[in-house]
Image (cartoon, helix red, strand yellow):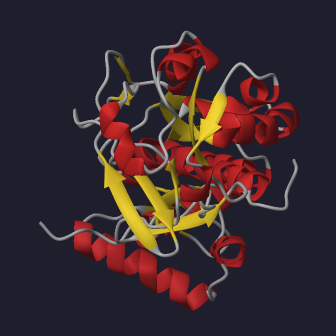
Amino acid sequence: MAKRNLNDLLALVTVAREGSFTRAAAVLGVTQSALSQTIRTLEERLDIRLLTRTTRSVAPTEAGERLVRAIGARFEEIEAELDALTAIRDKPAGTVRITCADHVLRTIIWPKLVPVLRNYPDINMEFDVSYGLRDIVADRFDAGVRLGEAVHKDMIAIPIGPRVRMAAVASPAYFAQHAPPKTPGDLVRHRCINQRQAGGGFYVWEFERRRRELEVRVEGQVIVNTSPHIVAAALDGMGIAFLPEEEFAPHLEGGRLVRVLEDWCPPFPGFHLYYPSRRHPSPAFSLVLDALRIGNSG
């Protein structure tokens, strides 16, 4: 079924409300003759007279009054919704959903977004703590966060944090019983704290030195899927852990953890926010993007 052009109906409602072709034409921004022709065409299409015209005034017929009552309120609703959209544009509102790991949420995202939430009370934030690379389109997220700048096709990535270094650590008590590894390959003879990823597999530990890259699949007694529990297991002497060095910083400074293989852990691009390139950002999401970009402290 072909869609109908609703301009002629809007013209009818305007003429009926203004009671004059002259005033209605001015409201609609058209000429009086063009407006008159629009109404005549509508009446011919419906095969019924809608307006009674005299030399001094114009008024709807019974059929015209019925049609104006039926559709006039709907045009008012449309106008109200358009006004509401304008208000949203001028006063950002709505929910922004981001999926990310707990560490980046705690140390980078949350501190930068607190001022946004305080200044824009109509913006709501929803955070999904996840360690996998979620399908943000299928799962209806506005954005996701991951280490590095490589993202899937049709995604935009913006840096939101400084460069990152990984760190392999264990407790002094663990190294009192096990000789520290000298190369990544030595890790296969150690108990390591494994991280279960969202897809079900284990995180593969990646190292690099002098452009030589190594991947090591480790084993151990403990398997978890969140970084705070990995840190806790390392502190309790359960083996060697591998996370961004910031996760261990206070414990390294306090001597509760000892770092190894530091020369195999060069810095690399840090956390990036990624989102679909074809999605037009809402005003609320645009504010979140601006707040999270590197160089903006909020």
Q: Give the left or right position of residue 99, taking residue 286 as reference.
A: left
Q: Residue at x 70, y 49 (%)?
A: 288
Q: Quadrant of the N terminus?
A: bottom left
Image side of residue 208 versus residue 94, left or right: left
Residue 199: % across, % down: 24, 37
Quarter holding residue 45:
bottom left
Task: Give the residue furthest to the top.
Answer: 236
In the depicted structure, whether residue 205 falls above or below residue 171: below
Q: Residue at x 41, y 53 (%)?
A: 206
Left or right: 245, with 152 as reference point: right
Residue at 52% x, 42% y is 73
Q: Horizontal and vertical percent for residue 77?
A: 55, 44
Asked which quadrant contains residue 236, the reply is top right
Q: Eyeballing the image, is 26 above or below 165?
A: below
How many marks do you count on the picture?
0
Q: Is residue 217 left or right of residue 293?
A: left
Question: Can residue 298 be seen?
Answer: yes
Picture layout, residue 255 above or below residue 200: above
Give the image quarter of residue 197. Answer: top left
**Residue 185 percent across, percent down from the top left:** 35, 49
Q: Residue at x 32, y 29 (%)?
A: 196
Q: Residue 252: where, in percent of width, then height?
A: 74, 29
Residue toward you, 134 or 56? 134
Q: Considering depth in this image, is 255 or 283 the residue closer to the camera? A: 255
Q: Nearer the viewer, residue 292 or 164?
A: 164
Work out whether residue 91 or residue 62 is closer to the camera in this orientation and state it.
91
Check the image and report above or below for 251 versus 32: above
